[in-house]
Amino acid sequence: MTNHHSNPVTGASEERFYADGHPLDEVHYLEAKVILNGLRFTSVQSFREFEKFVRKAAKAARVDFETDRYEGLRPQIREVLFLDTKEFKLYNNAFILRRRTAYEDGFPAGEPEIVFKFRHPDLDTASQLDVRPSIPGMYRVKFKEEWLPRKDRIGGLRSLYSHNVEFKLDPLTFSSDLTTHETLVEVFPILRPLMANENERLELVNRTAVEEVLQKLGALDFGKGFEAESNVAVWRTRGDQHQLVGEFSFQCKFQRREDLSARALLKCDEFFKLLQHEAQDWISLGTTKTGAVYRLKGAPPQSHE
């Protein structure tokens, strides 16, 4: 999906740029997500129960679901911390900032990862927003089209565009406190107009640390090179182990959206809708994993999700 627009005079296609002359980021990922009732997940066996829905929907949609190389994989554990102002200023303006740490055998594995994203239903709005950080180290931009069920009924589809950037918190290159106003607007210049109050700080959203338990399920092959790895996860609060929400997702990467086979996309669409019907007793409509964390203490914030 290229970020061009037509000149109203000449009709020619013109490439668009950020303020520093860098071409606008393009969508290179398609990720489909089905949000699930967290209370359905009581043990690792719950992941296998959901896998049966995936297999049944894949068979009905004539999609190959390969699980052999995933047999015996144990769930991965990650800690997810959301940071925002007390009034949820980031989330209310379609931004999400989280810190994610992977664990192995009970201990952190590698450096924590920062994920900063702008999520919006309008592609043009999402693409024009420059999420690139001003940091000395490496970072990776991931611009995704996300498919979610409709908010009001099973079996539908709606799109969000998630413009993300990820980087590791390597202490050798990044030692500042990201919760301070000074560091936040220095690292993410796009936030400077929003964070006009220099006294504002970020804090842990709803004082909640999330524990994610993620199980890889298998690879979905929609044909014509359109393959996507799938997983299912549950988020729960650390401490009281309250099951917040679950999610099934699969994702594919592509160079250009136009390169995806129309037939393969139709099969993907069909599978996505069939799965909702197969797993309808597990599905939680009208929310996201992030939304579940923000709504934990009561009054929901505004969002573009």
Image (cartoon, rainbow, N blue to C red):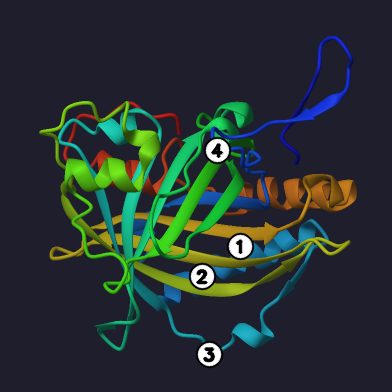
Nearest to the eye among marks 4 and 1: give it: 4
Q: Would you say 34 lies left or right of 186 here?
A: right
Q: CA distance from mark 3 to mark 1?
A: 19 Å
| CA gap, disc 4 and disc 2 | 50 Å
Report how far apart the C-alphas of labels 4 and 3 lie in the structure. 48 Å
- Taking the spot 85% from the left edge, 51% from the top edge, the residue there is 259
Q: Nearer the viewer, residue 229 or 232?
A: 229
Q: Secondary structure at mark 4?
A: loop
> Closest to the observer: 61 or 230?
230
Label ID, residue 53:
1
| Element carrying mark 1 | helix
Q: Nearer the viewer, mark 4 or mark 2?
A: 4
- Reading the image, the residue beneath label 4 is 20
Q: Residues within 10 Å of mark 4 (few under 14, many from 20)?
A: few
Mark 3 or 2, nearer chain start? 2
Q: Residue at x 46, y 39 (%)?
A: 118
Write down the quadrant of residue 21 in the picture.
top right
**Mark 3 vs mark 2, CA separation in Å:** 15 Å
Query: What's the mark number on residue 49?
Result: 2
